[in-house]
């Protein structure tokens, strides 16, 4: 059996901004209050999602500087192919859904696993999950950008609702899933060149 190969990115030591500034918080609240088109019209739960989004913004910490030593993070989320390879290598039985997705050529989709499964994967390879500060620095860079690619929203840079609607309209082969290949949106990479 082959080992899982992970493409690591080194994030250099240094200070970075975490949390949201007051200006960013106002901008996100305004954006949420103007969500009227696209998928919001299609979802019956749009009011609940809007309230959840507003609550998340309210509970995000105020922007402040933090310091982290060097660390490594995977360039991409762990894929189904990588997760099944791990399971076979560790003598575990892969999920039937993962095998089915592999058999249909969808092994580059992210492995959607439970917390304890992610922790078992890490333990097996003597790894650990990133801390919330590490995720934030890898995704937002050192200057506290709103999005990995910058401060301006662009739905073509990631697997977001608007991307899904576009893919459905184009009858993309993966339109039946909410997941897309982990490297599908290169324009959405963070400054650290990570697809967090």
Image (cartoon, rainbow, N blue to C red):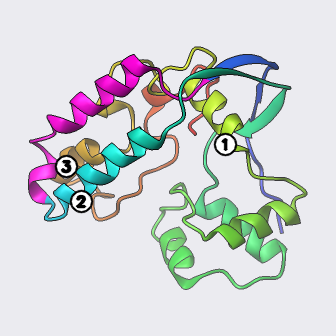
Residue 185 appearing in the image: yes
The quarter of the displayed image where residue 94 is located: bottom right
Marks 1/2 in contact by CB < 8 Å: the verdict is no
Say which residue appears at 48% left-offset and 63% top-offset: 105
Residue marked by disc 3: 165
Mark 3 to mark 2: distance in Å? 20 Å
Residue marked by disc 1: 132
Q: Nearer the viewer, residue 70 or 10?
A: 70
Say which residue appears at 51% left-offset and 73% top-offset: 103
Q: Secondary structure at mark 2?
A: helix
> On screen, 25 above or below 88?
above
Residue marked by disc 2: 48
Marks 1/3 in contact by CB < 8 Å: the verdict is no
Q: Residues within 10 Å of mark 1 (few under 14, many from 20)?
A: few
On screen, residue 90 versus residue 131, left or right, reads: right
Q: Nearer the viewer, residue 106 or 68?
A: 68
* Region rendered in magenta: 18-42
């Amino acid at each position: 059996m082959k080992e899982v190969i992970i493409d690591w990115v080194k994030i250099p030591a240094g200070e970075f901004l975490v949390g949201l500034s007051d200006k960013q918080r106002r901008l996100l609240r305004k954006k949420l209050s103007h969500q009227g088109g696209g998928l919001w019209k299609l979802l019956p739960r749009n009011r609940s999602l809007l309230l959840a989004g507003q609550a998340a913004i309210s509970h995000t910490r105020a922007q402040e500087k933090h310091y982290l030593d060097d660390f490594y993070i995977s360039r991409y989320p762990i894929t189904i192919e990588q997760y099944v390879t791990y399971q076979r290598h560790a003598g575990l039985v892969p999920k039937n859904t993962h095998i089915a997705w592999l058999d249909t050529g969808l092994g580059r989709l992210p492995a959607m696993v439970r917390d304890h499964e992610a922790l078992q994967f890490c333990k097996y390879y003597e790894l650990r999950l990133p801390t919330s500060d590490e995720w934030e620095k890898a995704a937002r860079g050192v200057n506290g950008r709103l999005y990995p690619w910058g401060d301006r929203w662009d739905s073509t840079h990631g697997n977001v609702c608007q991307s899904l609607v576009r893919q459905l309209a184009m009858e993309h082969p993966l339109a039946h899933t909410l997941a897309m290949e982990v490297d599908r949106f290169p324009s959405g990479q963070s400054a650290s060149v990570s697809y967090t």
